Image (tube, rainbow, N blue to C red):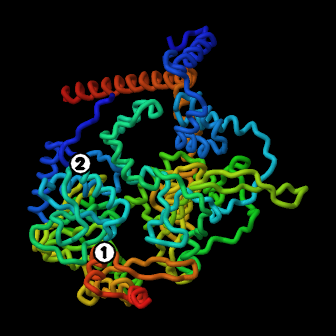
Amino acid sequence: MYVAVKGGEAAIDAAHELLAKERRGDQGVPELTIDQLREQLAIGVARVMAEGSLYDPDLAALAIKQARGDLIEAIFLLRAYRTTLPRFGYSVAVETGDMEIRRRISATFKDLPGGQKLGPTFDYTHRLLDPSLAESADSGERDEGAVGDVNKALAPTAARPAPSAPSEPSPHVTKLLGDQGLIEQNPETGRTPDVGDLTRESLDFPADRDMRLQALARGDEGFLLALGYSTQRGYGRTHPFVGEIRMGEVDLFFEPEELGFEVPLGSVTLTECEMVNQFTGSNEAPPQFTRGYGLVFGHSERKAMSMALVDRSLRAGELGEERKAPAQDEEFVLSHADNVQATGFVEHLKLPHYVDFQAELGLVRQMREEWHEARAADAAKMSQTDQSEAAE
Amino acid sequence: MTATPKYNFAYLDEQTKRMIRRALLKAVAIPGYQVPFASREMPMPYGWGTGGVQVTASVIGKDDVLKVIDQGADDTTNAVSIRKFFEKTAGVETTTETGKASIIQTRHRIPETELTEGQILVYQVPIPEPLRFLEPREVETRRMHALEDYGLMHVKLYEDISRHGHIATTYAYPVKVDDRYVMDPSPTPKFDNPKMNNSPALQLFGAGREKRIYALPPYTKVISLDFEDHPFEATKFSHPCELCGARDSYLDEVITDDKGGRMFVCSDTDYCEKRLAAGHLGNSGATEAAE
């Protein structure tokens, strides 16, 4: 039984024991290792790091294992761990222009300085299940006739190792447009910009763009995807073009106050999306393109693109556009983007509500009684009138 | 060994093809009208040409010669991917030559070379509803089409003129088909709109995610919306293609350095190559030849 009057504690312990057993599954199948998860489920690991707001592939892989593949549960685990970590400072702003690029595409220009680089991508693969993957690839020959070979043939860039030559300078597409004044300028911020910290301050409305971007960066991929999609279908259209998506490694620096110079901390994998959006201009400003921005830990183009679409939509007020679509409503978007919050509140409905429900039950019973009494009184009055009318 | 799944000719099963062909026939019978169809999951993502691929898969036969272009070019990644998909699943002959193809699947362009009778041009369509950005609700837009109530669209175009002095739509420029339905030409540049009018080829439009098919039978009247005092004007370029010198083709801008250097080249790669082979040279081609 779900709950008895007493004995809840024993039931919970037993449920957790059962969960641990179910998590392990069939003992005859080898147990997953953290290394396997980190290396072979890298996209899932990236999502957990991004929405968990903690860059640690090993911990993210551990969380996925513990959560039985439930990514939102894994994100929750990582967030819960993150909040216990001491904060010793803020890194210097990363320079994505200097990224060691693994993938970079532009949908606005066929060719551009630094070139396009397909890198590892699902794009242009045919979504045909590859039966050869069902067998251990290390143990035998691949089945050359299998449908999956279409993908192999179609992904020439992904199949080859990246060239070791240093990548040529790849300035952002938006910089190229900006040099001609065709796109709005970003405000100058310098290397140590003064930005808020969503994890240390509460989110107030109206929020500034720094806080909005932080909320979107840790926001649920599915929610942002749906909102971004809605803008494409006419609910707050923004005329987006993918100016550029780049993915690769960026060096991270920290400047301890007592030292006064920057110390390298290591590097992180980032996916960055710069959307170029149409804007017709106004009396004060000539027509130019506007920006939507997405930046995510790990390799996650869907999230970076969705974030950029929603970022641009949330700028509606600032750009003098009428706010009428859900994606333009700052409070609606930012209050509901966090999946740890969302899953918590939705799933809390499973918690006992006996007391509240009992109160409601009492009230409904009372109201029903009153309703019946009122009807009975009405009926009595009616029949009295009928009788007196008939008597006339 | 795991059994290798077997796929039917051109991937789709025959029932699905029949369903799509019925939708196509209805679409041809009512030019410009959006026919709902039961779009299938395809092995490429929605938004990447699933509608076009389903239409092509339903009309293609063993003797067809297929050409696939994306943004005018045969060598862009998605065009290569779709071409290989049909090479693999239908085993048909493919070509990059517009004149040799019996079916041309396209994303966002109409070839510069004039199409001929018997050819089929299959468009990939993201948003089939021309009124979508004026009215997001399908119930409303279908009612507007049924009543031929296109006032909203004319008001939008008029507002453009009053604000900018001209109609500020450069692609997906709405057209009126056979004096009845307003149709989205898919996001082709408006440069291509005149090519749709009275074309000898059959033009089919497939929108997979939105589950709509529409069509233009050969020699259908297709008029770009405009006003008497603000007639439609196709985009014109102030310079020729730098490779082949063409003055009548749609040009792509290519950034050559980060100092503002840029060049303009034909978006239709087949057209450009044909011209080069015939000895036409543009500025950069002429320089190279002189070196």
Q: Secondary structure at mark 2?
A: helix
- Counting from the top left corner in percent of width and height, residue B218 is at 10, 70
Answer few, some or many: residues within 10 Å of disc 1's Cα (few below 14, many 20 plus, some between 14 and 19): many
Q: What residue does disc 1 label? A: B268
Residue A185 can be seen, yes or no: yes
Q: Would you place residue A348 above or below residue A318 in this image? A: above
- Counting from the top left corner in percent of width and height, residue B224 is at 23, 78
Q: What residue does disc 2 label? A: B89
Q: Secondary structure at mark 1?
A: loop
Distance between the Cα atoms at labels 2 and 1? 26 Å
Which of the chains bears the disc numbered 1? B
Q: Are marks 2 and 1 on the same chain?
A: yes
Which of the chains bears the disc numbered 2? B
- Counting from the top left corner in percent of width and height, residue B133 is at 35, 65
* Location of residue B153 by image quarter: bottom left
Discs 2, 1 touching: Cβ within 8 Å = no
Q: Residue at x 50, y 80 (%)?
A: A287
Q: Residue at x 27, y 59 (%)?
A: B140
Side of A233 relative to A74 (left or right): left
Frontmost residue, A267 versus A156: A156
Answer few, some or many: residues within 10 Å of disc 2's Cα (few below 14, many 20 plus, some between 14 and 19): some
Side of B145 relative to A262 (left or right): left
Q: Would you place residue B280 above or below residue A350 in this image? A: below
Q: Amino acid at mark 2?
A: Thr
Q: Amino acid at mark 1?
A: Asp
| Of callouts 2 and 1, the N-terminal one | 2
Q: Residue at x 25, y 77 (%)?
A: B112
Quadrant, the C terminus of chain B: bottom left
Quadrant, the N terminus of chain B: top left
